[in-house]
Image: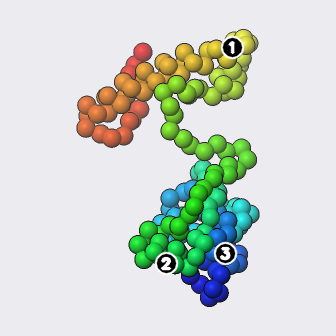
Amino acid sequence: MTEAAGTWRRCSSCKNEIDLGAVYWTCSVSTCNRKRTGLVFCTVSCWDAHLPVARHREAWAEEKTAPKTPAAAEPAKAAGSGKPASSGKRRIVRPNEAPMSAATPEEILIIASRLKDYVRAKSGYNTSDRVLEPLSEIVRRVCDEAIRNAQREGRQTVLDRDIPDS
């Protein structure tokens, strides 16, 4: 806790105080949330101001809530978690950026617009949206084979040489 009794921390960008129980934002990138860094922002625009310096490939602001009492703020610091206590979080996606998520087995893996552009440029044909599911299944099978090849080699990284020739 900082100077004022109702203050939890200061914004990492503008240095304004973030009150106890107030909404604040953190960066989705792990290097911004480490114990030594622990960046917190009072507004999304303050979070956005750190992007030119941080040079993240893909990032979004995560909305969180500061602890409501000074006692609740202290255990998080004592535990050394490096992350402020939070009652919940919500992702805010920057325009033109989609957050990375773990793909479920049924999820479409193909970018429809890119596929349609390719087919149109190559042949002048249109492409049905129903093509996306079977292509995604083919990509899953190829990825599964590549994963098995990497495992067989004792690696935990799938490389280009693990992709089977077809």
Q: Could you tell whether 124 is left or right of 83 in the image?
A: right
Secondary structure state at the residue bearing disc 1: loop
Secondary structure state at the residue bearing disc 3: strand
Where is residue 5 drawn, in percent x and y? 63, 85
Residue at point 67%, 52% (across, down): 92
Where is residue 72 drawn, in percent x and y? 52, 74
Name the residue tied to disc 3.
18
* Amino acid beneath label 1: Ser
Name the residue tied to disc 2.
74
Q: Are marks 3 and 1 in contact (CB under 8 Å)?
A: no
The disc placed on residue 162 is none
| Residue 89 visible in the picture | yes
Counting other residues with Cα less than 10 Å from the Cα at mark 1, is it few (<14), some (14-19), or many (20 or more)? few
- Of residue 152 and residue 6, the one placed in the foreground of this image is 6
Q: Residue furthest bottom?
A: 3
Name the residue tied to disc 1.
128
Where is residue 78 drawn, in percent x and y? 42, 77
* Amino acid beneath label 3: Ile
Where is residue 81 drawn, in percent x and y? 44, 68
Counting other residues with Cα less than 10 Å from the Cα at mark 2, is it few (<14), some (14-19), or many (20 or more)? some
- Of residue 130 and residue 70, the one placed in the foreground of this image is 70
Return the disc, 1 or 2, that comes first in the chain's sequence.
2
- Of residue 93 and residue 116, the one placed in the foreground of this image is 93
On the rendered image, what quadrant is the N terminus found in? bottom right
Give how far apart the Cα atoms at labels 2 and 3 are: 15 Å
Q: Is residue 157 above or below residue 57?
A: above
Return the disc, 2 or 3, that comes first in the chain's sequence.
3
Give how far apart the Cα atoms at labels 1 and 2 are: 57 Å
Residue at point 47%, 72% (across, down): 76
Secondary structure state at the residue bearing disc 2: helix
Colouring convention used in this rendered image of the protein: rainbow
